[in-house]
Amino acid sequence: MKEQLEKLSAESLAAVAEAEDVAALDALRVRYLGKKGELTAILKQMGKLSAEERPAMGQLANSVRAKLEAAFDARRAELEEAALEARLEAEALDVTLPGKRTRAGHRHPMDIVIDELKDIFIGMGFEVDDGPEVEESVYNFDRLNTDEGHPAREWTDTFYLDEESRTLLRTQTSNMEPRIMETRELPIRAAVFGRCYRKDEVDATHSPMFHQMEGLVVDKHITFADLKGMLHNMAVQMYGPDTVTRFRPHHFPFTEPSCEMDVQCHKCGGKGCPTCKGEGWIELLGAGVTNPHVHEMSGIDTSKYSGLAWGMGLERAAMRRFKIADLRLMFENDVRFLEQF
Ligand code: DAH
C-alpha cells in the first residue's frame, strides 16, 4: 500500500505540473482526489491492514492528499495568472498609435444662402413658409393662371404622380401663392423656401431637384416700383453695395406685367466673360405684378388690393454668392467642397 501511495503521489504530482489549462487540471483533480478517484480507491483497502500498520498508513495517505491539494492550488493559480497575462497582451492598447480624427460637419452653402435670405426678408416684415413638395396640379398650375395645354404642364417637363395628372412634384414654389392667399389675412408678406422638381438632365447648371424662393406681397397700392425697390435691396444685401441690377420684360402666366431681374456679372463687371456666357449679366429671378385673375381665383378683392411676386432659383443665387462654377458640386456632399464656406 505504501508503494501504491508513493506511486500515486509521484504520478499525480507530475501530471499536475504538466496540466496545460484549468480544465485539464480540474479533470486531474477528479481523477486523483474525487470520490471515485484513485486515492479513495487506495484508502478503501485500509481495512485489510493490521492495527499496527494502519496509523502510519493513514498518516502517509493524509500527507499525500495534503501535498496533492497544495499542488493543485498552486498550479491553478499559475494557470490563471498565465491566462490573464495572455489576455492582457492580446487586448493591449497601443497608446502611441495616432487617433482617428472625427470630422465635424459643415454648413452647406445652400443652407447659408437660405438663412441670409430669411434674415433679409424678415427684416422687411415677411413671414417665412415652406409648403408641400407633393402638390395638386390645381395649386401648381391652375390657380396660377396656367391652364391645361400650357407647355409648362407637359409630361416631359413635370413629374406627375398619377395618370390623370392631378398630383405632381411641385415645379415651382409659386404653388404656395394660392395656398397662402386663400388662408392668410391681408395684407400678406410671405417668403417661401423649398425644393422643386423638373425633368431636367443633370449638367453644370441644371438638376431635376433644385431650390427656389418665392416672394409674395398682397396689399393696398402695391406697384411695380415696390417690386423693383425690394428686389434691388435684396441683391445689394446679398452681393454687396456695388451690385448693379437690371429688369427685363418677360412673360409669366401669373403676373402682368412680368420681368426677369439680372445682376451684373461679378467676374467681369459687365464686360462679358465665361461665367456670364459673354452676357455681362446673370439672370437671378422671375417676377411681376400679380395678374388680377390670380387674385380673383383666391378670393381677393382686386378693386382694393394688388400684389407682386417673384421666384428665384437658389442654386444660382448661391453659386453667384460663393463663386461656385458647377451646380453638381452642391449635391455631391464632398466635405472638401463644403469646408470652403
Ligand atoms: N415660378 C417661376 C419659375 O419657376 C418664377 C416666377 C416668376 C415666380 C414670376 C413668380 C413670379 O412668383 O411672379 O420660373
Image (tube, grey):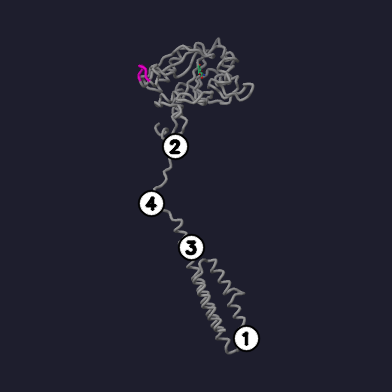
Q: Are marks 2 and 4 in contact (CB under 8 Å)?
A: no
**Image quadrant in which the N terminus is located:** bottom right
Quadrant of res 204:
top left
The CA distance from mark 3 to mark 1 is 45 Å
Residue 43, position as x, y percentages in the image: 60, 81
First along the sequence among labels 1 and 4: 1
First along the sequence among labels 2 and 3: 3
The CA distance from mark 2 to mark 4 is 27 Å
Would you say 226 lies left or right of 184 here?
left
Q: At numbered mark 1, what does the secondary structure look like: helix, strand or loop? A: helix
Q: Main secondary structure of the magenta part?
A: loop
First along the sequence among labels 4 and 3: 3
- To which residue does mark 2 refer? 105
Question: Can residue 134 be spotted in the picture?
Answer: yes
Find residue 96 and name its label: 4
For badge 3, the amino acid type reads Ala
Give, as a single range, the part of the protein colored magenta.
268-273
In front: label 1 or label 2: 1
Q: Nearer the viewer, residue 287 or 37?
A: 37
First along the sequence among labels 1 and 2: 1
